[in-house]
């Protein structure tokens, strides 16, 4: 955050597929969980809290106000690192404060000062703001990356037991240049440094974009996919502007476990919200050894196909071929071979002429049973009982990044639902029950985990699973099972 | 261009295969012994295969039936062909009359994971196309088994019952795929459990396979299969 504070606390009406509630913020910290709630802290003392990661509200400000905090939970402590200018830029310092809880209503809620962990003297090639914390899963060592444009992104080691600087006299290592808002993650033998390039704080004119490099050691060198070191300006794009949002910055990892990873960020300008700076949470995907900024599910009509079986979810009714049922005929001579072409004239490959329109669900559903109908899987044949409309359900809550959805047969109100015995049914109509609300998380490989908000009479979490080639059920999630991973395809 | 559809098997190949099978079938038809992949049970009970497939069945000689769509198959299998059609546990050699034709139940063990109904019918000189096969077996469990699933594959359409409850229906012109159709979770009783199937074939090859899966989707093996002798 290289310019002025931007304090945004917006009471925003719910718009489809953005976060809900009040989610205006700039330079959000990594989103962390405490006692079932989600918390993030931004520049200027702003704070957001959410019960589900979808609907956000203003939270309690930190006792230290500053720029672009970051927070990490280690043991029974939440360490928060907040930077502030202590003179003319780039003279700055990063202070640590810690608490046993982030919940102001808890009797344990009490902030303690931890002191300065990094600073810049206004002359050296660094601006000690924009802290990012990284706990190495390999050895438990805690690292701080920081910096903003004036010189380098730097790395120092902290003590995970106290959150303070481990060896204050050690010289910081330079990792990258010409960027800010850095953070680090690890996966499969690689350390990834993600940092924000471009300019901030200019609304829809902000060039903010998140870029990255990777290294075999936490100390670098961090090279991008073209082999350019980030200390020489390299950086592979992770997430940039698109759709109705401009200026992506301040990556933070939100690991939900079981292979479900998301990331938090802010947009400099959300065009649907007057160009305000807002928080978002999106799926974190992986491709060819690099993280990829995924996108939350957009409403629409889809084929829902099992990665494991290749068959598609459908209402268990007798299908009608698109264009109507045709008597099985001879092959004839094939397309374009008219009478006299030597192949026997018209055959099954000649088609029926003209454009065959999509199946009219109102027409074909006349033969479908009323009431509840089973669910099954079948080869996708573009038929009406195989097309599902996924639509957000207002005021039904959500999960990090998305609202709950209803999943209905396109053109009908027949709704997919979980049953009390952890099986599936399609109800005659959507009534809004929690067994009819679906959470759809995009997984690392781009497939989707689909799970009901609640299975009746059960406190356990289940996910949609193919069983055999031709049926579906609910099962405990196994990230390795292709049966639990789904392709959401445009029909 | 190749087509996987069995109606498209080159006529020469069909004729050649039929000729070979016919030779075997004639010799077997004379002593009522089943086809090469099927043998007469030689022990009181049988255990499932290494992959959990049920190897022992009572098969009724085929009944004429045509059509493979959901509604046509459901109508075909719900038609009453013989008394106690959905409850009887027949014996090897039992005979009954369907549409004026006398049909016999045959106890068989399959040497494969699947039960080859084409071999079965052909060896008996019976039609293999546009037919319905009834199959019954008895699964004996040492204790109640909850949360298991019946998992089947069939060529072509088939409907399945466990202890009288319909649990699977798969339709259309399809080939046998292991665990193609899988039931919802069900409970097998301690002691005998009756598994019943109706398989409808359009044309060409016809067979089925069946096994139970445990709560972890692993093949269930802790049971025996036995058919009452006449």
Image: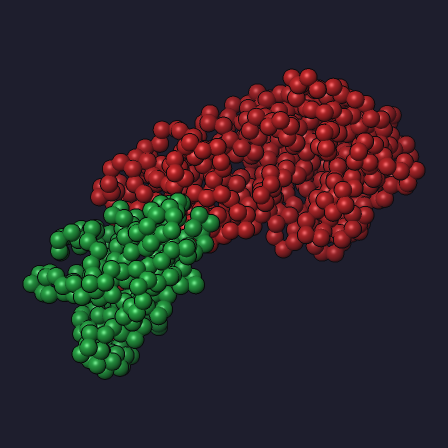
User: Which quarter of the image is occupied by the C terminus of chain B?
Assistant: bottom left
Colour green maps to chain: B
Q: Is residue A296 left or right of residue A336?
A: right
Q: Position of residue A159 (x, y in %)?
A: 82, 36
Q: Residue at x 85, y 44 (%)?
A: A173
Residue A65 is drawn in which quadrant? top right
Q: Position of residue A176 (x, y in %)?
A: 79, 45
Q: Is residue A421 left or right of residue A329?
A: right
Q: Is residue A52 visible?
A: yes
Q: Position of residue A197 (x, y in %)?
A: 72, 41
Front residue of this view, candidates A315 and B30: B30
Q: Residue at x 73, y 42 (%)?
A: A184
Q: Residue at x 41, y 55 (%)?
A: B222
When the figure is inspected, residue A123 is found, relative to residue B151, above or below; the finding is above
User: Which quarter of the image is occupied by the N terminus of chain B?
Assistant: bottom left
Colour red maps to chain: A
Outermost residue, left side: B100
């Amino acid at each position: 955050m290289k310019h002025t504070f931007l304090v945004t606390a917006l009471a925003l009406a719910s718009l489809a597929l953005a976060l809900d509630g009040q989610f205006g913020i700039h330079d959000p910290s990594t989103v962390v969980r405490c006692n079932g709630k989600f918390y993030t802290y931004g520049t200027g003392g702003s704070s957001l809290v959410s019960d589900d990661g979808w609907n956000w509200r203003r939270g309690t400000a930190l006792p230290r106000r500053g720029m672009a905090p970051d927070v990490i939970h280690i043991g029974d402590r939440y360490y928060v690192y907040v930077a502030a200018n202590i003179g003319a830029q780039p003279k700055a310092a990063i202070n640590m404060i810690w608490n046993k809880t982030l919940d102001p209503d808890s009797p344990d809620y009490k902030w303690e000062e931890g002191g300065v962990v990094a600073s810049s003297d206004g002359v050296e090639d660094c601006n000690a703001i924009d802290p990012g914390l990284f706990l190495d899963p390999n050895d438990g060592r805690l690292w701080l990356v920081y910096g903003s444009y004036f010189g380098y992104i730097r790395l120092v080691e902290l003590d995970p037991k106290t959150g303070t600087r481990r060896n204050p006299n050690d010289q910081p290592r330079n990792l990258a240049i010409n960027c800010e808002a850095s953070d680090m993650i690890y996966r499969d033998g690689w350390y990834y440094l993600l940092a924000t390039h471009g300019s901030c704080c200019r609304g829809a004119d902000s060039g903010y974009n998140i870029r990255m490099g990777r290294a075999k050691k936490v100390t670098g060198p961090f090279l991008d996919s073209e082999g350019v070191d980030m200390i020489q300006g390299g950086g592979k794009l992770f997430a940039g502007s698109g759709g109705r949002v401009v200026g992506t910055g301040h990556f933070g990892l939100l690991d939900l476990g079981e292979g479900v990873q998301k990331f938090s960020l802010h947009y400099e300008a959300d065009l649907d919200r007057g160009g305000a700076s807002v928080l978002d949470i999106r799926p974190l995907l992986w491709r060819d050894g690099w993280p990829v900024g995924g996108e939350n599910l957009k409403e629409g009509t889809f084929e829902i196909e099992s990665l494991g079986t290749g068959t598609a979810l459908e209402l268990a009714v007798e299908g009608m071929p698109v264009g109507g049922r045709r008597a099985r005929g001879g092959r004839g001579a094939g397309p374009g071979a008219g009478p006299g072409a030597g192949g026997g004239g018209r055959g099954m490959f000649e088609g029926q002429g003209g454009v065959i329109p999509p199946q009219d669900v109102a027409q074909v559903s006349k033969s479908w049973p009323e009431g509840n109908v089973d669910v099954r899987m079948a080869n996708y044949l573009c038929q009406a009982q195989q097309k599902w409309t996924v639509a957000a359900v207002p005021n039904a809550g959500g999960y990090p990044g998305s609202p709950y959805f209803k999943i209905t047969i396109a053109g009908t109100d027949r709704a997919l639902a979980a049953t009390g015995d952890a099986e599936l049914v399609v109800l005659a109509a959507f009534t809004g029950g929690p067994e009819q609300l679906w959470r759809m998380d995009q997984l690392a490989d781009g497939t989707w985990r689909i799970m009901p908000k609640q299975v009746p009479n059960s406190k356990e979490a289940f996910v949609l699973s193919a069983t055999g080639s031709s049926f579906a059920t609910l099962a405990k999630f196994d990230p390795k099972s292709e049966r639990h991973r789904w392709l959401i395809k445009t029909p | 261009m190749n087509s996987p559809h069995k109606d498209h098997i080159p006529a020469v190949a069909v004729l050649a295969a039929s000729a070979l099978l016919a030779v075997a079938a004639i010799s077997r038809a004379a002593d009522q012994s089943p086809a090469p992949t099927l043998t007469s049970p030689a022990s009181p009970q049988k255990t499932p295969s290494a992959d959990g497939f049920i190897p022992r069945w009572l098969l009724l000689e085929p009944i004429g039936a045509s059509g493979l769509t959901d509604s046509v198959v459901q109508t075909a299998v719900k038609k009453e062909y013989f008394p106690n059609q959905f409850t009887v546990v027949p014996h090897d050699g039992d005979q009954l009359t369907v549409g004026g034709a006398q049909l016999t139940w045959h106890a068989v063990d399959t040497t494969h994971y699947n039960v080859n109904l084409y071999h079965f019918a052909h060896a008996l000189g019976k039609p293999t196309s546009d037919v319905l096969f009834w199959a019954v077996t008895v699964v004996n469990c040492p204790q109640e088994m909850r949360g298991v699933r019946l998992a089947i594959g069939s060529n072509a359409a088939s409907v399945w019952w466990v202890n009288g409850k319909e649990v699977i229906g798969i339709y259309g012109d399809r080939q046998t795929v292991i665990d193609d159709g899988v039931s919802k979770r069900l409970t097998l009783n301690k002691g005998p459990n009756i598994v019943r199937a109706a398989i409808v074939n359009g044309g060409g090859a016809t067979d089925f396979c069946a096994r139970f899966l445990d709560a972890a989707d692993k093949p269930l093996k802790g049971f025996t299969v036995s058919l009452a002798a006449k």
